[in-house]
Image: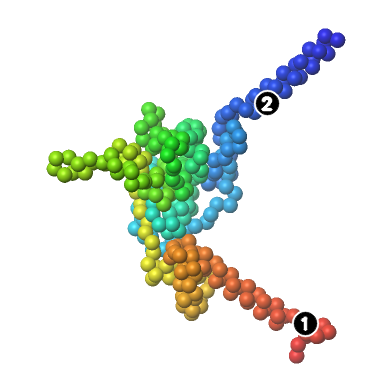
Amino acid sequence: MQDNALETLLVRAERVLARLEALLPQSLTAPDWTASVAFRYRRRGTTTWLEPVRQVARIHLEDLREVDTQKERLLRNTRQFVQGAPANNVLLTGARGTGKSSLIKACLQAFHAQGLRLIEVDKADLVDLPDLVDLVQGRPERFIIYCDDLSFDEGEAGYKALKSILDGTVAASGDNVLVYATSNRRHLLPEYMKDNLGARHDEEGELHPGEVVEEKISLSERFGLWISFYPFSQSEYLEIVAQWLRHHGLEEAAIAAARQEALVFALERGSRSGRVAFQFARDWAGRGQAAQSELNASIDAPGPEGLDHV
């Protein structure tokens, strides 16, 4: 009788321990690094892991138009990094839809054969950056920690974690890791008129920002390379549209005929950006292909009572 009671107690104790273990933070383990050239940092409860990206976006540098200066600067920095030379963390800021994220993905396509790897991390998971850096430390690949559409509200934990990794921790982040981030905010934090109340003037009239402003720009200043993107002009937008229509196989005459529709599409969207140009080209090319398929189907359809048209 006592043996049965003891056995029941042990079973219950094992169940309790199993539940407690599930609540404890799990250490990050290495993935199969050969499974992909890009990974996503995932979290479910207390469990974290690196998920290989099975279908990596195939964006090539030649696909990106009207951002030649930005392309050259990021390409140069990434090449230095891949070659083991000193390189900077990069902050890409500016107008939405102008190719910031696409340029990073294009660099991965250009250099993955030379050992470049990309790990995408959501803003909410930036607090785990030290664990991620420790995981890849000493590996032969070169890792870009990629944070897309990065911005912070006041007091978010990820802000301090990223700030420490970029510069300021006792432990070095390793020479095989860089952070590439995109943002519509140059200083990554919201800026308010009241922030300027702490500014002061010296005797010579020189303006000195207040502590609040200094704190807000301190994170962006830790990125060694800033690359700015600007809204496209009408001619630049139409050139990007033409490039994507060529990508979809349209002839020059058809591309010229689509110009007015492309401008209307941009007007309706309220933006002449590379993203809008890409979306218009997909819509326009898709409509053309669908219309051609319907025409082919009508030609091949049998006539009345199953007889072909004469």
Residue lying at the far bottom in this picture: please name it: 310
Q: Quadrant of the N terminus?
A: top right
**Amino acid type for the residue under numbered disc 2:** Arg
Does residue 86 lie above or below 281 as drawn?
above
Q: Are marks 1 and 2 in contact (CB under 8 Å)?
A: no
Residue that numbered label 2 is attached to: 19
Q: Quadrant of the C terminus?
A: bottom right
Identify the element where label 1 is drawn.
loop
- The answer to whether residue 214 is left or right of residue 285 is left
Does residue 98 lie above or below 33 as drawn?
below
Instruction: Tell me where residue 156 appears, x and y as whole percent.
Output: 45, 37
Q: Which image quarter: residue 209?
A: top left
Q: Which image quarter: residue 33?
A: top right
The residue located at (53%, 46%) in the rendering is 38
Residue that numbered label 1 is attached to: 302
Q: Name the one closer to the observer, 73 or 15.
A: 15
The residue located at (29%, 42%) in the rendering is 197
Give the alpha-carbon distance from disc 1 to disc 2, as whole Å: 67 Å
**Amino acid type for the residue under numbered disc 1:** Pro
Instruction: Tell me where residue 102 appears, x and y as whole percent.
Output: 46, 55
- The answer to whether residue 226 is left or right of residue 269 is left
Residue lying at the far right in this picture: please name it: 1
- Total residue callouts: 2
Query: Callout 1 environment at 10 Å: few (<14), some (14 to 19), or many (20+)?
Result: few
Name which of mark 1 and mark 2 comes first in the sequence: 2
The reply to whether residue 28 is in sight is yes
Choose mark 1 or mark 2, whichever is in front.
2
Q: Which mark is residue 268?
A: none
Q: Name the one closer to the observer, 32 or 268.
A: 268
